[in-house]
Image (tube, grey):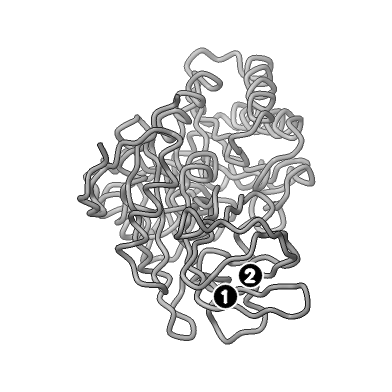
Amino acid sequence: MMSTDFGKNRVHKIAKDGMTDLIRIISEKHEAGQPFYLLDLATIERLMDKWNNSFPNVKPFYAVKCNSEPALLTKLANLGANFDCASLLEIDTVLSLGINPNQIIFANPCKAISHIKHAATVGVNLTTFDSKLEVEKIKKWHPHCHLLLRIKAPRDSGSLRPLGKKFGVLPEEIEPLLHYACNVAGLKVVGVSFHVGSIAQDPNIYREAIAGARAVFDVADYLGIPKMQILNIGGGFRSTPLFEEIAGVVNEAVQSYFPEPNLTIIAEPGRFFPETTFTLVTHVIGKRVRDEKIEYWIDEGIYGSFRPTLYNSCFMGIKPLSMKASKESCQVCESTIYGPSCDSLDAVAVGIKLPELQLNDLIVFYNMGAYSKCAGTKFNGFDTLSTPTYLVSTNSS
């Protein structure tokens, strides 16, 4: 029996095929113009099992920037995850949930002084760097912090969004920067970090980056720096069949290049955990028919969850849902979905096939957890920062 208590802190336990009914019931509590999210906590559990099975020796530090929904962070912490934060606010968001600062890596190679000072105050004592100036800032404002040298992945063209133009030292910069950080500034560099880029497409780019990290460990040994202990393999993971292939390449490469028994391996998965666990429910708030094409307006758009510079629309699923179950249209039309703002660029989907919908019907978007809700704004007076999230736990049957 499904409860009629639909508070956002309540977990609604439903069968896998019960999501549509739950969406309809919750929608009846909302006026049009109020989209909402569903977060499936059981899917997070299954994803953590998948991670642990594929990466038994790699500690996940979830990238908070991907989605900072408190219920998601709490669930991940309860499942044993740590956290990758890039700013003062992200650090405070994690700490406010009662999570220990030792579970945080401040994984931003270029940090404002105020953020470095705050990390020192609250006890976040592990960070990344890739420049001499960053060493000087850390030396002055957080001298007891342990450091990971961020290197540029040798080949990040095998990812959908490379990061190497902005982050990571080049091979010729490694020795002088390590020498300066450890032997001149007297800081403790305890390991190496890299990131092959967002959404890795080629598993072999991890092998090449791990080989590059091995070279840094060797340089540190040559310079007489205390033995490094941490390898951070970054992110780029999605929960797809390619994930197991990537894990196989990473695990084999680590065995080949790092026979050290006491090495700690960490990673910074972002979209791997939230992408498939969030569902966005929107309302049809407008409609226009032109010839045989239909245009719809919904209560979410590119200034909210569909920010084109962050969200990858090719990964989302779209399902129209009539609020009158017996009135499902059989006619399929070429359709465009617009967001609510007055910006003509605010188009969510163009030229897709949908059955004809009516005012207040729903359009449900799946795989909406990664770099979506976190990009909300109040542009044009539409507050997409306050979109509520309802908690769900679906069984796997």
State the residue position of label 2: 337
Residue 183 in view (yes/no): no
Residue 152 in view (yes/no): yes
Residue at the extreme front of the image, as rendered = 326
- Tell me where residue 239 appears, x and y as whole percent: 58, 35
Badge 2: residue crowd in 10 Å (few <14, some 14–19, many ≥20): many
Instruction: Residue type at mark 2: give it.
Output: Ile
**Placement of the N terminus among the 4 image quadrants:** top left
The answer to whether the residue labelled 2 contacts the one labelled 1, judged by CB atoms less than 8 Å apart, is yes
Up-down: is 263 above or below 296? above
- Tell me where residue 56 appears, x and y as whole percent: 49, 18
State the residue position of label 1: 297
- Tell me where residue 277 appears, x and y as whole percent: 47, 43
Query: Which secondary structure lies at badge 1?
Result: strand
Q: Earlier in the sequence, mark 2 or mark 1?
A: 1
Question: Alpha-carbon distance for marks 2 and 1?
Answer: 6 Å
Name the foreground residue: 118 vs 14. Answer: 14
Q: Quadrant of residue 125?
A: top left
Q: Is residue 164 left or right of residue 360?
A: right
Name the foreground residue: 130 vs 1. Answer: 1
Instruction: Residue type at mark 1: give it.
Output: Trp
The circle drawn on residue 18 is none
Q: Quadrant of residue 19?
A: top left
- Tell me where residue 93 appears, x and y as whole percent: 31, 55
At 34% across and 61% down in the image, what residue appears?
388
At 67% across and 17% down in the image, what residue appears?
252
Query: Which secondary structure lies at badge 2?
Result: strand
